[in-house]
Amino acid sequence: MAVPYKIWLSILVFIPILAMLFISFSNLSSSVSVGELTLSLAHFKLLWESSTVIAFRNSLIFAVATTLISFVLGYFIAYEIKLSKFKNKFILLTFVILPMWSNLILRTESLANIMSENNILKNILGFNLFGNISGTWMAVLFGLVFTYMPFMILSVYTALEKIDFALEEAALDLGLRPIKKFWKVVFPLSFKGVVTGAIMVFLPTLAGFAIPKILSRGRIVFIGNIIEQKFIYTNYNHGALLAVVILFFILGSILLITKFDKEGETLL
Amino acid sequence: MENQKATLKDYGYRDFTTLNKIYKILKKIFVVAIVLGLYISIIVIAIQSINESRNLSIFTRVSFQWYANILQEEELMQAIRNTFLVSAIATVLATFLGTFFAIGLYALSKKVRVLWMLLNNVPILNADIVTGFSLMLMFRLLMVVFPNIFGLFTLVMAHLFFTIPYVILSVMPKLKETDPNLMDAAMDLGVRPYKALIKVVIPAIKAGIFSGMLLALTMSIDDFAISYFTTGAGFDNLSIWIYAVIGRRNLTPSVYAFSTLLTIFTLVGLLTYQFLQKQKKGKKNEKNNFSDIAS
């Protein structure tokens, strides 16, 4: 019964990617007839344009910063959930992921609203909770971190939960202080979860376009925003080329994940 | 001197009690701040939904008019209908196909299976924008044969593409837990292979199928980027519609009302699910059932 899925996956994984590669190397577009079709590297000029370079730089910097911050905060929360005396961990985790069930765009938009100068929270509380950071890098970073952190919390928690408590007891019996026990025993054992979480935060941030667009009010351009522009103006060749570049980052991450996790089970 | 207890220092340990106290307080503040960060947007959406004023920056009076108004908002209702239509079709198909694909993949030798599971991860790990863009290109190529392909059909196909892997991922571990002899036993007892599958294997993995279905539904209903690229003009799901509207003018507060309702339903649903799960399993399996449903 695996055959249909093999066909399905092959069609939907390889053909779109091949189409993307082909289009980024050729002058194929709706106005070009089959006879005039040529292959060229002409589109690659785009990669050295300053707007593209800046967009890549923005995407990378924000993705790295978001990953690091969500790692610190997310690990902390995951560890607190593990330590908490509350028996039913499922309920706690439900509350961590509950925000992810409501519409991402709407959440981002309401964040953008309360980050602006006059907002409903100011009206109710009497002061401005976020200051006036609408449109700045801080707004974007805040939105990204708190949108994607649940992924980090979940995968770190999954890894933490698997750690045998006997190991921690042994570490304490052998005279380690709790802080040292954490660094020498717990953290290394949960590292797999950190890698998975980091990738699950890094990739959507790197390739995102809606959150930076809404929260920076269009001022900070990510590579995704350029792809979106190319899509709107039906410049598929350029869009495909940029998407291919992102794809390379993703392939790297998939290789990394398989190094730590053979059948992708930590993804769940 | 006479009655004083020996301190930790006298035993040669350093005294961390005060530091620990400070750490504990700081920890609580941190937890509250982070949870607030996670929830601030949901809270604002909820406030917005009960605000009588249409103005997003002024709270006038508590009112539930926007809840009653959801049904009157034609554009919003259309977007909601589209979202549910696509998600329902995609979830049902993905659950059905994903389960059978997983059983098929499980029958392969381990080496081959690992390879296909790797490929199975591609749609999950691939950035939405790349998936969306590349699928869009492929559908455009198909347009030569089927000119009106963009819309419901392409959306459902795209959603199937990224939801089936989740179903497979959640069914696979359950398959591994089942006794490989079950199927043989059933067939020895004279049941036909196809029937043995339905009567023996499926019931054994139904928890995995159910969680896979929930995952598929979650992913499908909230998807923005892939849908954005693969839909046709005029067929907007909720995310696309909101994204388009916020660029032009203020949203109707009914959107906030709808979103709040959805959040409440989700919460109630999850807690009920958990409650039922607990009643069924007793207490033995408490630890592991979050992974059934969380993504």
Image (cartoon, coloured by chain):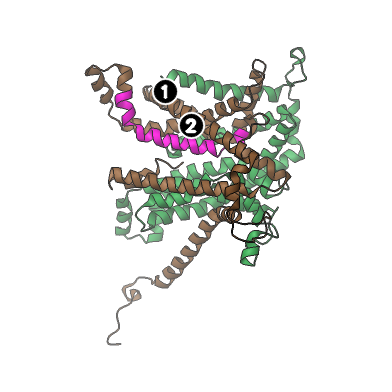
Q: Residue at x 72, y 33 (%)?
A: A232
Foreground label between 2 and 1? 2
Mark 1 — on which chain does it sit? Answer: B
Which sits in the foreground, B43 or A205? B43
Quadrant hosting residue B244: top right
Circle 2 packing at 10 Å, graded few (<14), some (14-19), many (20+), is: many
Quarter where residue A118 is shown: bottom right
Say which quadrant the C terminus of chain A sits in.
Answer: top left
Find numbered disc 1 in the image and state the secondary structure of the residue it sits on.
helix
| Residue A128 appears in the figure | no
Answer left or right for B161 relative to A106: left
Using the image, determine if residue B245 lies above or below residue A38. below
The residue range painted magenta reads B198-227
Residue furthest to the top in view is A35
Q: Which residue is mark 2?
A: B91
Total marks in image: 2
As shown in the figure, which amino acid type bears the numbered disc 2?
Answer: Thr
Depicted B6 relative to depicted A184: above or below: below
In the image, the chain rendered in green is: A
Determine which of the numbered discs, if any, sits on residue A123 in the image. Answer: none
Percent of width and height locating residue A202 = 56, 43
Q: Secondary structure at mark 2?
A: helix
Q: Position of residue A187 (x, y in %)?
A: 42, 51
Side of A118 where B20 appears, left or right: left
Question: On the rendered structure, is B23 left or right of B236?
Answer: left
Residue visible at 35% across and 70% down? B13
Chain ID for brown: B
Q: Relative to B55, does residue A55 appear above or below in the rendering?
A: above
State which quarter of the image contains the N terminus of chain A.
top left
